[in-house]
């Protein structure tokens, strides 16, 4: 029964991590950008959904959709305000673009989270859950929301997979991540691909944020830890490797859950951090990264 | 050159230094308020203090001197609070400071209160270390006062309520202590361990969880496996998260104890109602006339600001009166005289009768608690409202639980 | 002084250098020659210790240095003149040279006058005396190269490795550099020059080693190597044969593509200078030139991938201001030498992406047509591009470009790094392609023999300038000797 | 003879102007301005130490607070446990030593990797330290912080001079180091490690050295600041947001100048304080300003000051 509990809980939290990290790694894969405003966008989407439901009286589905809209808008804005100007700036040397984009997205994340705190205080907010109640399987009572979360994560990841592998436009995205120059030579505008990636990223990050908001609640305090955890998972899996990120997300999810059950909830995050350090040391390209 | 911030600062500093500072009799008594505007608990501190100052001024002030409140937002940061404190004392020449509900911030300010010899009182921090530091080096740290309950005092008050409500009222016999792994819960948990067996609740387990826990399912499952009658809580920073999962997982065990965020009137909305049935200790509650001053304060606050004060709002309101009272008795705003007068405080405020523990007590300058002094309340969220269920003479409703909770 | 034996370097599955052996004596200049991708640079990096060889021995003064980190190799007396390096842009030229003189100790906290003097002396020697206090971004390209040379001299190396010494330099600058390098020899140092082709270093080297596909194919004096049959095959593609062209080219009419006075700079280096050429509808034009002559750069300028001066006109209108993708959509499709395939996608997916603007039925027809043209691709449809052989990858790259229905196909170095057997298949495919459509082609080739049979007209490019222009049958008599 | 070249360098001139201005402040500034600048000066040392590592050795350290926190907590814990039997200055030195040891332990794995991986390794170090502080709350005081019994001085002016002197000396050393032969080698290693290796430099050794120097000054500054503040807490010394502020300060002031980092730090703190009347919006506006500088003046404040004279 304990094993089953660990299995279910680890799966739910791992799915959530996976969804959050997928968008993050997608952006890196296609445009080489590490978006440090990631956590802020997740939280903004969740808080927007909370506000729509709590303050404007929208239903759970409408609130969630509204939250996604806000998250996508913010992600697009991130691209236009911070990433694109630096990518195109002739005054920033190529070698330094990375640190500039990191700094700019970091500052942008702070701006977003301060704005959230200003408008809605930094209290943790819970998004109105779409499904309620509990499900009892094998003698373990699990919130239905936990299954819902895992299901939505996998549907979103599945849709992304279908988009990327089964549609023409999606394949162009995938191609751009392998060889941006090749894509340009085929007459496809990279700038449109980048925009498309940021839009998709916006949807993924928002859905992840809103699900987290239903599962646990979020506040502007969550911004830093959320970015850090996406970053860690993505590096653990290998930068730019979507499948690597998915596996790493479950590794971290299960490691945390197992630690909480078997050792103590006080040490929940430590083994995952240790694993990360060990992987960095022995296999710097990540578990599934290619060099 | 003036566009450069440093010269601008220097110029302004220069000007400030040139102004005369001799305290005239008609000079206002200045009280600095350093608080967290973005946090619900902290956001009531400044408005409540202002309300008290306005009331005092409307009645002619203190010995002819008006009270002036100067507000500083500290962004919940200890480092920024230290800067604000220096600004308050050195630049704005405040006579006393009301500071923060966060223990980290108050502890960072304590040495500054000592260095700058300025009276400081916290309306909401709970750490025992604050008063322990005063006991350790009284002469140095005597400027700090603890205007809220310390963790160990809170544990005692929770046990008092537990005896009536849980043991005598619901025939409960066992409990699990659940608290966030933080320094402020160490004395709280020690207090629980000590007093729970005394009131007849067997402590089955003691779980401390990391404040950045992202999933409480393992914790609740473990507790459920131990089959206690009640969970005695010690949560502050992470209040929303465990409450939400408690509800969504339908953990059949009541939560009872400290849950700082549950005292916020917005907590129902923040948790989408998951808090239904949560019992939490507080020094005040909506509609609860702890003293004759409580409800008039709440009404005035709501009329002026459109929302209900947080727990630190009540204490901040009282703290202004306490400082004003001490200044009146001392006939001066000299810090040492103010300290002496503050130590003799015996004032009935919105949360009860306030008096500070004397020199020699391990928690010197902490609030006296128990019969005759502050007893606290035990409130419960019921259908979107905070209902007081304890003590009996102040109760406005009976303890009741949502359907998923099993009570014998 | 330096002996290399059985040197092998593998990157993953790719063998960059295979059983390479050569030696350099003190007071000798050895040229290590080979086209792009032949492994010459990798061999040099293995000597320097930048890369660790997979197998084999690198002996320097009798000591095996294979696998030593580069700072240790350097301290033994090996210096490397980089082709591209990133100088310290905020420091002066003098300080840049000083860096090379600083001993590798952490105690060096103060600048010493001795180092200063030595740096000045070296700067004088390489001809930087006048610009000592300027910062690298303000220097002319040749002076930047001088600075690299100065840094190598500062090390007092017994063996100097020089990477493409003359790339991007003018004729006078080449002469000055040759002198500087010859001085090394006069001082008794050993020199290893690495370059694309024999011609540019022939006057300077005592001996040359030619490489192709990671292996040594010839060794001897420069003249011997130039006369070597294998070397000629690699560069020229064997004996010159001119195949008769069936279709009469459209010799007149307005040009489809017109390039006027195009000039491209990479930082300070002039890669293409004042090139003008044109291609008419239906024509097959070949631009031949050795590696590094500027073909790829010119093509990239046409495709809008690099900034350039001068004008490129397409079907009568200037291309200025269009993005590379818009130019490609406009009908100028480039099949680059690097192929730029989507390595983790299958052959079919690569082709479908090429035809991403086609209707499903048109796409299917086009695929069928290409599979007839390159039957091997039909067998490989489900295979991931990365795992194809070099020849197959090249065919896929061409096929992918053709999926775009180009009006002008720019084919850059299709033979690069391919075994001779494959060249024939490729040549046949091109022939069939010319037979089945009225496609306009601009082919960039080093391998003249490969280009000649297909071309209607020929341009020869050398050091970024057009050197010759004419009909293929005049090439052998007028330009062939000057070519290699 | 012309003045020596270092006197003509703009960063040095800017640095000297700041020092001159700084020396005048105690004459006119109130205790509050002094207190504000005291903190700004310590932050300036953090930022300069970070810039040595990033601007010169080319390594983006996301975890400056790991080094600072180690220094601060080591000094604080020693003092809290052993005072009054141990001198305050001994605790400060122990803090610096701990930061150096921690720096080496972190650098050994971190220097094996580059780019984002290096960044993440350093970030993880901060998260670990943060966890450790909470887990070993008995020793560290946990999330509410640790009070230290000793203070350097209760006089605002004395504290100001200590911080000011410390910043001036650290700045001079770090700047001198950046201009010394080692600084050149470091810069070469950061720009083009392959070439630096081929020139005979052990790149790893030099980067490790840069890390150690950076760690030493970060730890020392952290330890000194503890005895100024009177408490050590996660929010002041370890939290990622503190590291973010340091990085922003260095980039804002102008990378690769050492002195620019100090200017950036003083600017950020002064700005945050000047905007305090705006209350909750202050952080937002400071971040916005910083973002604008990063986007429009990539060379930072020092670059802006130099802007007009850079046509050479």
Image (cartoon, grey):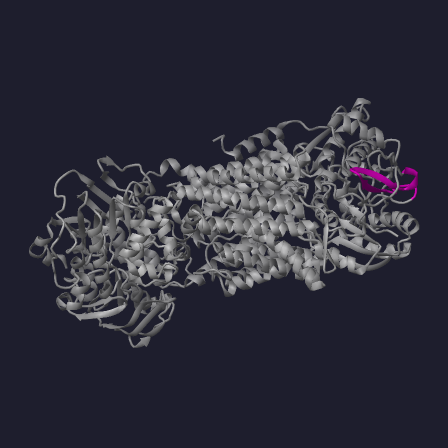
Q: Is residue C85 left or right of residue B102?
A: left
Picture quarter with the C terminus of chain C: bottom left
Q: Is residue C467 left or right of residue A27?
A: left
Quarter-wise, where is residue D281 in the image? top right
The front one of D308 and C192 is: C192
| Residue sitting at the far bottom | C62
Q: Quadrant where the N terminus of chain C lies?
A: bottom left
Q: Up-down: is D241 above or below B309?
A: below
Residue numbers of the magenta segment: B371-394
* Rendering coords of residue C244 (x, y %): 11, 55
Residue A228 colored in magenta in the image: no
Residue B45 visible in the current orientation: yes
Q: Nearer the viewer, residue A204 or B14?
A: A204
Residue nearest the observer in this picture, C424 or A207: C424
The x and y percentages for residue C230 are 18, 68
The residue drawn where x is 31% and y is 38% is C322
Q: Would you say residue B377 sits in the magenta stretch? A: yes
The x and y percentages for residue C176 are: 18, 55
Q: Residue at x 45, y 39 (%)?
A: D295
Which of the 4 image quarters holds residue A118? top right
Q: x%, y% of residue D123? A: 55, 54
* Position of residue D12 in the picture relative to residue B281 (left or right): left
Residue D87 visible to an observer of this rendering: no
Q: Is residue D296 above or below residue A184?
A: above
* A117 in relation to C356, above or below: above
């Amino acid at each position: 029964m304990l094993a089953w509990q660990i299995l279910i809980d680890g799966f739910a939290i791992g799915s959530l991590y996976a969804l959050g990290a997928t968008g993050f790694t997608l952006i890196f894969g296609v445009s080489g950008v590490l978006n440090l405003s990631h956590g802020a966008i997740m939280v903004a989407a969740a808080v927007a959904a909370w506000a729509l439901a709590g303050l404007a009286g929208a239903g759970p589905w409408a609130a969630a959709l509204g939250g996604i809209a806000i998250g996508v808008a913010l992600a697009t804005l991130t691209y236009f305000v911070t990433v694109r100007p630096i990518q195109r700036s002739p005054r920033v040397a190529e070698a330094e673009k990375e640190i500039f984009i990191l700094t700019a997205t970091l500052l942008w994340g702070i701006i977003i989270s301060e704005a959230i705190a200003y408008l809605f205080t930094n209290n943790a907010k819970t998004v109105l859950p779409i499904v309620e109640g509990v499900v009892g399987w094998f003698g373990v009572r699990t919130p239905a929301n936990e299954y819902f979360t895992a299901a939505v994560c996998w549907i979103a990841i599945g849709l992304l997979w279908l988009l990327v592998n089964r549609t023409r436009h999606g394949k162009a995205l995938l191609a751009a991540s392998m060889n941006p120059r090749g894509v340009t030579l085929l007459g496809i505008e990279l700038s449109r691909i980048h925009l498309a990636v940021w839009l998709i990223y916006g949807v993924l990050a928002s859905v992840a944020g809103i699900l987290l908001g239903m599962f646990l609640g979020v506040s502007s305090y969550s911004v830093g830890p959320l970015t850090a955890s996406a970053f860690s998972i993505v590096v653990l899996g290998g930068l730019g490797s979507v499948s690597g990120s998915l596996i790493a997300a479950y590794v971290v999810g299960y490691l945390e859950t197992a630690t909480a059950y078997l050792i103590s909830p006080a040490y929940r995050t430590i083994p995952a951090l240790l694993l990360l350090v060990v992987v960095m040391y022995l296999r710097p390209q990540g578990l599934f990264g290619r060099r | 050159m003036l566009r450069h911030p440093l010269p601008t600062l220097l110029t302004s500093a220069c000007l400030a230094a040139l102004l005369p500072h001799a305290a005239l009799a008609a000079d206002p008594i200045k009280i600095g308020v350093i608080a967290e505007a973005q946090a619900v608990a902290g956001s009531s501190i400044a408005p409540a203090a202002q309300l008290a100052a306005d009331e005092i001024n409307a009645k002619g002030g203190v010995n002819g001197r008006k009270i002036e409140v100067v507000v500083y937002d500290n962004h919940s940061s200890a480092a920024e609070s230290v800067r604000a404190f220096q600004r308050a004392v050195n630049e704005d020449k405040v006579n006393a400071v009301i500071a923060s509900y966060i223990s980290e911030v108050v502890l960072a300010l304590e040495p500054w209160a000592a260095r700058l010899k300025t009276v400081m009182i916290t309306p909401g921090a709970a750490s025992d270390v604050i008063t322990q530091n005063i006991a350790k080096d009284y002469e140095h740290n005597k400027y700090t006062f603890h205007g809220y309950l310390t963790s160990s005092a809170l544990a005692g008050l929770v046990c008092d309520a537990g005896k009536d409500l849980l043991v005598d009222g619901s025939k409960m016999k066992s409990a699990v202590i659940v608290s966030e792994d933080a320094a402020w819960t160490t004395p709280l948990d020690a207090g629980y361990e000590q007093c729970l067996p005394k009131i007849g609740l067997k402590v089955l387990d003691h779980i401390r969880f990391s404040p950045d826990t992202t999933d409480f399912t393992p914790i609740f499952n473990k507790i459920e496996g131990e089959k206690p009658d009640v969970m005695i809580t010690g949560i502050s920073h992470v209040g929303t998260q465990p409450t939400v999962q408690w509800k969504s997982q339908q953990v059949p065990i009541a939560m009872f104890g400290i849950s700082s965020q549950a005292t916020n009137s917005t907590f129902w909305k923040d948790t989408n109602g998951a808090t239904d049935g949560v019992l939490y200790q507080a020094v005040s509650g909506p509609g609860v006339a702890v003293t004759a001053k409580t409800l008039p304060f709440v009404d005035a606050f709501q009329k002026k600001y459109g929302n209900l004060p947080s727990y630190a709002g009540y204490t901040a309101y009282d703290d202004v009166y306490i400082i004003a009272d001490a200044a009146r008795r001392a006939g001066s705003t000299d810090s040492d005289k103010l300290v002496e007068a503050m130590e003799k405080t015996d004032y009935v405020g919105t949360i009860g009768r306030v008096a500070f523990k004397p020199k020699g007590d391990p928690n010197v300058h902490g609030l006296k608690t128990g019969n005759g002094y502050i007893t606290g309340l035990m409130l419960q969220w019921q259908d979107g409202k905070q209902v007081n269920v304890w003590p009996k003479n102040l109760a406005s409703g009976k303890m009741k639980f949502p359907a998923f909770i099993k009570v014998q | 002084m330096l002996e290399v034996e059985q040197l092998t370097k593998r990157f993953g599955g790719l063998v960059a250098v295979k059983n390479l052996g050569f030696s350099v004596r003190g007071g000798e200049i050895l040229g290590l020659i080979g086209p792009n991708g032949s492994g010459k640079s990798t061999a040099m990096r293995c000597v320097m210790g930048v890369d660790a060889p997979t197998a084999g021995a690198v002996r320097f003064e009798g000591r095996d240095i294979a696998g030593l980190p580069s700072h240790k190799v350097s301290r033994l007396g090996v210096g490397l003149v980089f082709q591209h390096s990133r100088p310290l842009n905020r420091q002066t030229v003098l300080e840049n040279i000083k860096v090379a003189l600083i001993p590798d100790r952490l105690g060096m906290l103060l600048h010493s006058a001795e180092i200063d003097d030595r740096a000045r002396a070296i700067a004088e020697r390489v001809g930087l005396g006048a610009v000592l206090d300027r910062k690298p971004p303000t220097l002319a390209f040749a002076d930047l190269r001088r600075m690299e040379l100065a840094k190598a001299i500062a090390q007092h190396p017994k063996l100097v490795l020089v990477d493409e010494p003359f790339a991007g330099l003018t004729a006078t600058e080449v002469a000055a550099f040759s002198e500087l390098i010859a001085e090394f020899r006069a001082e008794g140092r050993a020199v290893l020059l690495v370059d694309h082709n024999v011609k540019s270093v022939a006057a300077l080297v005592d001996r040359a080693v030619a490489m192709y596909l990671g292996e040594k194919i010839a060794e001897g004096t420069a003249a011997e190597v130039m006369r070597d049959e294998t070397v000629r095959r690699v560069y020229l593609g064997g004996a010159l044969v001119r195949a008769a062209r069936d279709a009469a080219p459209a010799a007149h009419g307005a040009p489809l593509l017109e390039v006027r006075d195009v000039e491209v700079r990479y930082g300070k280096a002039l890669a293409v200078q004042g090139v003008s050429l044109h291609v008419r509808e239906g024509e097959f034009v070949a631009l031949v030139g050795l590696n590094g002559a500027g073909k790829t750069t010119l093509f990239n300028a046409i495709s809008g991938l690099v900034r350039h001066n001068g004008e490129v006109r397409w079907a009568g209108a200037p291309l200025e201001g269009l993005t590379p993708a818009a130019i490609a959509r406009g009908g100028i499709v480039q099949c680059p030498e690097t192929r730029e395939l989507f390595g983790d996608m299958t052959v079919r997916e690569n082709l479908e992406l090429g035809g991403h603007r086609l209707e499903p039925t048109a796409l299917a027809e086009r695929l069928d047509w290409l599979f007839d043209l390159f039957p091997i691709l039909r067998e490989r449809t489900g295979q991931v591009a990365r795992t194809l052989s070099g020849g197959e990858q090249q065919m896929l790259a061409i096929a992918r470009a053709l999926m775009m229905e180009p009006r002008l196909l720019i084919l850059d170095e299709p033979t690069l790094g391919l075994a001779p057997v494959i060249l024939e298949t490729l040549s046949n495919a091109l022939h069939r392609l010319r037979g089945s459509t009225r496609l306009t082609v601009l082919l960039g080739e080093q391998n003249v023999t490969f280009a000649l049979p297909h071309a209607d007209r020929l341009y020869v490019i050398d050091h970024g300038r057009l050197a010759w222009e004419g009909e293929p049958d005049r090439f052998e008599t007028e330009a062939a000797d000057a070519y290699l | 003879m012309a003045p020596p070249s270092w006197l003509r360098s703009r960063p040095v001139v800017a640095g000297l102007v700041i020092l001159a201005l700084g020396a005048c402040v105690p004459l006119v500034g109130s205790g509050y301005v002094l207190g504000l600048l005291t903190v700004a000066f310590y932050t300036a040392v953090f930022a300069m130490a970070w810039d040595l590592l990033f601007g010169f050795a080319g390594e983006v350290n996301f975890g400056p607070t790991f080094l600072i926190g180690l220094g601060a907590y080591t000094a604080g814990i020693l003092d809290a446990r052993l005072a009054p039997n141990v001198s305050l200055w001994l605790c400060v030195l122990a803090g610096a030593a701990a930061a150096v040891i921690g720096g080496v332990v972190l650098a050994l794995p971190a220097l094996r990797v580059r780019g984002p991986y290096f960044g993440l390794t350093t970030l993880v170090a901060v998260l670990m330290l943060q966890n450790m502080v909470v887990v070993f709350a008995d020793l560290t005081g946990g999330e509410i912080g640790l009070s230290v019994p000793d203070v350097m001085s209760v006089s605002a002016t004395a504290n100001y001079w200590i911080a000011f002197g410390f910043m001036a000396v650290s700045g001079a050393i770090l700047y001198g180091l950046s201009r010394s032969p080692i600084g050149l080698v470091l810069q070469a290693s950061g720009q083009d490690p392959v070439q630096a290796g081929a020139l005979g430099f052990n790149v790893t050794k030099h980067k490790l050295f840069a890390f150690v120097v950076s760690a030493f000054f970060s730890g020392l500054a952290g330890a000194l600041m503890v005895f100024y503040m009177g408490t050590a807490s996660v929010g002041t010394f370890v939290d990622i947001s503190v590291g973010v502020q340091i990085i922003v300060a260095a980039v804002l002031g102008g990378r690769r100048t050492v002195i620019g980092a100090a200017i950036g730090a003083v600017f950020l703190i002064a700005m945050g304080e000047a905007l305090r009347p705006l209350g909750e919006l202050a952080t937002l506006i400071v971040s916005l300003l910083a973002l604008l500088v990063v986007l429009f003046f990539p060379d930072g404040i020092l670059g802006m000051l130099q802007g007009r004279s850079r046509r050479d």
